Amino acid sequence: MGDHKEQSLRVGAAVRRRRRALDLTLAVVAERSGLSVPFLSQVENDRARPSRSSLEKVADALRTTAVELLAAADPACSVDVVRAESTELEPEPRMRSLVRGHHQMHASEFTGDHDAGREFQYRNDQLMYVADGAVEIEAEGRAYRLGRGDTLYLTGGVRHRWRATVPDTRVVVVAVAEHIEAVRDRPGR
C-alpha cells in the first residue's frame, strides 16, 4: 500500500501544465494533434485516458514526448505515508525526503548542519520551515535569522545559502518540483 510504482498514472495534470507553460489553448492543441477539444478537456481533467497513439499526438502538439508527459504525470493514489526513521545511530548532519516519487512538490528534512558555503538557486518557489533550533539564511545579499516555527519563502531564482546556528537544528524545505515549469521568467532576469 502507498507504493506509487503499483499505481496507475494521471497524465492530465502534466498535459495541462505543459499546455499552459506554452500559452496554448485547448483549441490550438486540438488543431495540432487532430484530437477534439472535448476529448482533450477530458484528458486534462482525468476523465479520459488517452491511448498511446493519442498521447503521442498530444505530446507532439505540445513539443514534447509521451515519455516526458508520463514522467511528469501524477500517481493516481493520493495518500502516501513516509514514516520517521530512527535517528539514534545516524550521524549528523542528514537529509531525508518527506515525499516519495516524482511529484509536483518536493519536501526534505535537514537535521544538523550542512555545507554552509554552498549556494542554492532553484528554478521554482521554495519554503523553509525551522522545526527545531535556529538557522541563518543569506538570500540576495541579506541575512535572515530564523528560530523554531519561523518560515522563509523564496521565489524561484533567488540565490541563497543557509547554516544551522544551534546544534540539533531541523529544517523542512518544501519546493515546487524542478521538472515543473511553475515560474515564468520575471523581468530583469
Image (tube, helix red, strand yellow):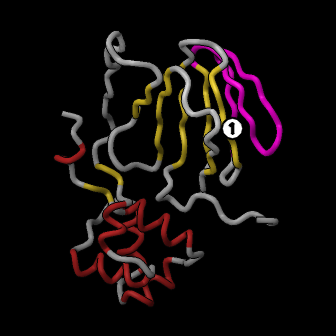
Residue designated by label 1: 153
Q: Quadrant of residue 43?
A: bottom left
Residue toward you, 24 or 60: 60
Image height of 142 relative to 166, above or below: below
Residue 151, magenta (yes or no):
yes
Residue toward you, 19 or 172: 172
Q: Horizontally, is 166 left or right of 146 in the view?
A: left
Q: Residue at x 50, y 58 (%)?
A: 180
Q: Residue at x 28, y 79 (%)?
A: 54
- Quadrant of the drawing holding the C terminus: bottom right
Residue 95 at x, y = what percent? 44, 30
Magenta stretch: give its range.
131-154
Residue 98 at x, y = what percent? 41, 32
Decide: few, some or many residues near mark 1? Use Cα within 10 Å; few <14, some 14-19, many ≥20. Answer: few
Residue toward you, 3 or 138: 138
Tell me which secondary structure the magenta stretch mostly adopts.
strand
Q: Residue at x 42, y 68 (%)?
A: 15
Residue 94, magenta (yes or no):
no
Residue 169 at x, y = what percent? 57, 17
Residue 124 at x, y = what percent? 60, 52
Q: Quadrant of residue 80?
A: top left
Looking at numbered disc 1 in the image, what kind of residue is underneath it?
Answer: Tyr
